[in-house]
Amino acid sequence: MSATLPDSLAARLHGIPPFHVMELLARAQALEAKGHDIIHLEVGEPDFPSPEPVIRAAQAFLAKGQVRYTPAVGLPALREAISGFYAERFSANVDPERIIITAGASGALLLAVAALTNPGDEWLLTDPGYPCNRQFVQAFNGSVRALPVSATTAWQPTAEQLGAAWGPHTKGLLLASPANPTGSVLSPAELNALCAHTRTAGKQVIVDEIYQGLVYGEAASSVLSQRQDVFVVNSFSKYFGMTGWRLGWLVVPEGFARPVEMLAQHLFIAASTPAQHAALAAFSSECLEILELRRQAFASRRNGMLQGLRELGFGIGHEPAGAFYIYANIAGLATDSMEFAHRLLDQAGVACTPGKDFGDWQAAAHLRLAYTADETRIAEALERIRSVL
């Protein structure tokens, strides 16, 4: 941030970095305003509209005019629906009382970190990983120890790596599967083993399952099918295609529900009431059929982009099995992904995300591309990149 910050600004804000993809998006939008055609492969937002059953449910609720607060932990009916979804889809027994509805997955992550972190506590986070997680920890005066991960370990930490990283102030581990930016997916056995290793060491675990459901070549899973002693974050944004509704949820272990509820009361009051009523329709058979067709479309896009990037000389060290991202190595094509991302935007009208947004480990050598555009636009983006190369 600028050196001209106000003297009264809290110290935690003096080291906060920009969210580079949002600044790149602003640049892309400015070019669009001047008449340039931009293909957006940078922001992790599905390009499909909100599912029609969700829209209808929101319209029916709003027509009644009674848009009031819900309980801080969310609509009882929605908590029951999520519990039923875990039982039916994943054979997981999750008490609705342990489910807290939040303002997006960001609200769930914020609650989990706030509930567990004392000043000086250290959290282990993967590098690369979702950038906001670092800021959540630091906002509550915790610290972050980055775990460098690479394609050789499928972009996930190993038990040996965790054992070497434990310190006297380590509070816990944050895992993501499917992961952003790599699309890496841990198998149920792998995820359970990492959680068991961490809990045996007396540490807490937060599992980010925000992209749950968006997996390819294997069945979707949840850590809650095997364990109930971890915090689990999920969202209506990615699989359910409801990004702008700002709705997510947090599953807490036994004994944490009441303290987290009181924290939510003070921090958020409650999540959006119209969004919660709309989300009740997300679990209907009609909506789930729509979401499955969209998942299949993402799978087809993924395959086409993987083939096209390889033909252009991008390195794919570990093939992504989930989410809607490819974390591609640009070695041999460029030396700095930040400069390369701006070059692709300015010269080809293709917006991608530089690795710097996700950490420091091998960041300059990687670029994240999201297959959140249709196949025609992806094919055109690949041709535009070819012209720059």
Image: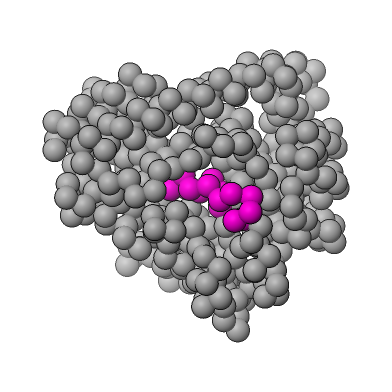
Segment colored magenta:
176-191
Q: Where is residue 358 in the image (x, y as percent from the top left)?
A: 40, 55
Left or right of residue 66, residue 348 in this image: left
**Residue reaching furthest to the bottom:** 168
Q: Can residue 374 be seen in this view?
A: yes
Q: Which residue is drawn at 47% across and 28% down?
A: 298
Q: Count how many numbered circles sit on residues in the image.
A: 0
98 vs 274, nearest the viewer: 98
Q: Position of residue 35 (x, y in %)?
A: 24, 22
Q: Is residue 169 above or below residue 215?
A: below
Q: Quadrant of residue 34?
A: top left
For residue 190: magenta? Answer: yes
Q: Where is residue 80 in the image (x, y as percent from the top left)?
A: 83, 36
Q: Which residue is drawn at 85% across and 61% down?
A: 255
161 vs 143, nearest the viewer: 161
Q: In which quarter of the image is the C terminus?
A: top left
Report the coloring of the rendering.
one colour
61 vs 194, nearest the viewer: 194
Q: Quadrant of the N terminus?
A: bottom left
Q: In this view, does 297 lie above or below 216?
A: above
Dominant secondary structure, magenta: loop
Q: Which residue is drawn at 32% across and 67% down?
A: 3
Left or right of residue 364, residue 214 in this image: right
Q: Can residue 102 be seen in this view?
A: no
Q: Where is residue 387 in the image (x, y as percent from the top left)?
A: 13, 31
194 vs 49, nearest the viewer: 194
Q: In this view, does 31 lie above or below 101?
A: above
For residue 202: magenta? Answer: no
Left or right of residue 330, residue 201 in this image: right
Q: Residue at x 35, y 27 (%)?
A: 304
